[in-house]
Structure formats: C-alpha cells, structure tokens
Image (cartoon, grey):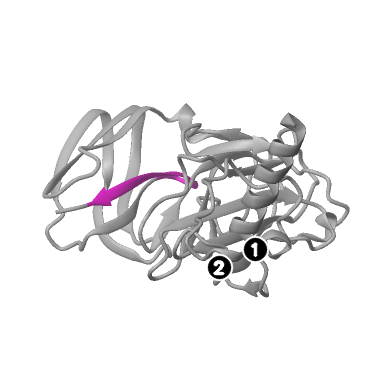
Amino acid sequence: MNKLIISVVALATCYLMAFSPDITILKKDGAEPGYTGSPGDSLKNCTACHGGTAIKIDGWVLSNIPKDGYIPGTRYTITPINFESGATRFGFEVSPQDLQGNLIGKMILTDTITTKFVGGEKYVTYTANGIESQDSMVWNFDWIAPTNGTGDVTFYGGFNSNYDNHKDGDKTYLSTLTVKEQTGASVSDISNLISEFKVFPNPSSDIVSITLDLKEKSRVTIDISDMSCKQMESLIDEEMTGNITKQFSTSTLTNGTYLVRLKIGNQSTFKKLTIGR
C-alpha cells in the first residue's frame, strides 16, 4: 500500500510539473559540468535543459588581462556578466580550455556565496544564492595564467536568463574570451605593489571612498567603467605612495553596477561597485 501511495504522489507531481503553468522551477545550485558550448564539451550548452537555441554574443566574459596579453603565472580577475531586460534569474558556467577540453591555468573562487566549482575545479558556475537579480547579474573569480609557452587561451561561457521562474521562454547565450600570452614577459602581480585596495560604502548612494596602500611610489590610475568596460570617469592619474584615502561623488552615475579599475604599470585589478538610491 505504501509503495502504491508513493507512486501515485510521484506521478501526480510529475504531471503538475509538466502541465501546470503555475508550478515554478526551484532555485538550482549551479549548472552541471560540461555545458559551456566549448569544443571540448562537445558544444553542449544550457539548451540541453532549458530548450531553445543558443545565441552567440560578445563581451559577456570580461577580464583585467591587458590587451597585450597575460603574463604567465600572474593572477587575474575574470568577470562573467549576463544582461537580459526583464529577467529576474540568471545562470552561467565558464571554463578556460584548449580544443580538447583540457583546463588551462588555475581558477580560484573569490566569492563562495554566489559562485562554486563543478567538475572538480574545471568549471565555475553560480550557486543558489547567485541567481536572483533584475535585468543583469555579475559574478567574479580569479585565474592564474598558465606556464610560459602556452599561447592563446579561450574562456568558454554558457549563460541562461529566466523571466518568470519557468523554463518556458528562457534565453541561452554563448560568449567567449580569447587572451594571448605576452611573449618574453616576466612574472608580476599587482599584489606585490599594494597591501590594500578598498571601495566603500558598497552599495553607495552618494559618496564613495577608495583606500589604497602602496608598497612603493608608483604611477596610479583609477577609473570607473560600466559593465561593458566603457570608461565613465577617471578618478586618479598621478604618482602616489603610502596609504591614501580619497572620496568621490557618484552623482553623475545612474543606478547600476560598475567596475572600479586600479592600474599600476601593466598590472590592474577591479572592484565591483553598486550604485543605488
């Protein structure tokens, strides 16, 4: 009798999930490994679960890697982003791979609240706490560039946008970022140049403070850009040393998410800043 009751309940649940438009999907804790759309993943992507057709889009995998390429052994920040007007839930999965699907370099989680590893440490994806937002979602993780002689590296990203907590009407996007290697470059890291870099309060509604502790006198550039890396304002461009705190007005910025970039020489790092009033 118990087995019969369990079977009836299971069948009823499946029926409701399949045919009732009022049943919402649960908050899933990350994508399954191997759905970035890369050649090494056999081109599999989010449409395997969400249906529809994947759309290729540029600029959804960002980084602070210089235009002239990565320096082997250097740590950089990778920023997957997802834009979809009207969407309220967002997902992603990113992996730097060669054409055979081998992981290139080493990824490091910097925000375990909204991101996690799957497939060992080969893929970074979202968590159940890194899904909900309005119109866009931003995640971050770090990447240590591979050894000298590796050459070009491609980050493959699969993204999904959801409108009403149902899979119907979901949008799937594929975006890549290919970075080259700086030939003959020496290993360096911005952490060798600074002891501290803080942006607060965050979120900010009016005035934002930036604290920087330099280990030696350096030419410092700090600017604010939107999530497509379009520069909005230049805040600092001068030689500095020691511990510095400066305040800036955010009155010219509309509500949203921005990137505060610190650059010293050919090394740079980002802090995410949210403006809300």
In the rendered structure, find residue 99 and report the number of the disc placed on it. none
Picture coordinates of residue 212, whole percent (x, y) = 28, 32
What secondary structure predominates along the stretch shown in magenta? strand
Q: Is residue 265 magenta?
A: yes
Residue 13 placement (x, y as % from top left): 62, 49
- For this view, does 232 lie left or right of residue 34? left
- In the image, 39: left or right of 243? right
The residue singled out by tag 1 in the image is 50
Question: What is the x, y in percent for residue 20?
Answer: 54, 63
Q: Looking at the figure, which quarter contains the C terminus? A: bottom left
Q: Is residue 187 visible?
A: no
Tell me, for residue 170, which label it has, or none: 2
Q: Nearer the viewer, residue 8 or 121?
A: 8
**Magenta region:** 263-275
Tell me whether circle 2 and circle 1 mark residues in contact (CB < 8 Å): yes
Using the numbered discs, state the Cα–Cα distance from disc 2 to disc 1 in whole angstroms: 7 Å
Q: Is residue 170 above or below residue 139?
A: below
- Residue lying at 16% horizontally and 39% vertically, measured from the top left: 246
Instruction: Tell me which label, 2 or 1, sits earlier in the chain.
Output: 1
Sort mark 1 into few (<14), some (14-19) or many (20+) by Cα contacts within 10 Å: some
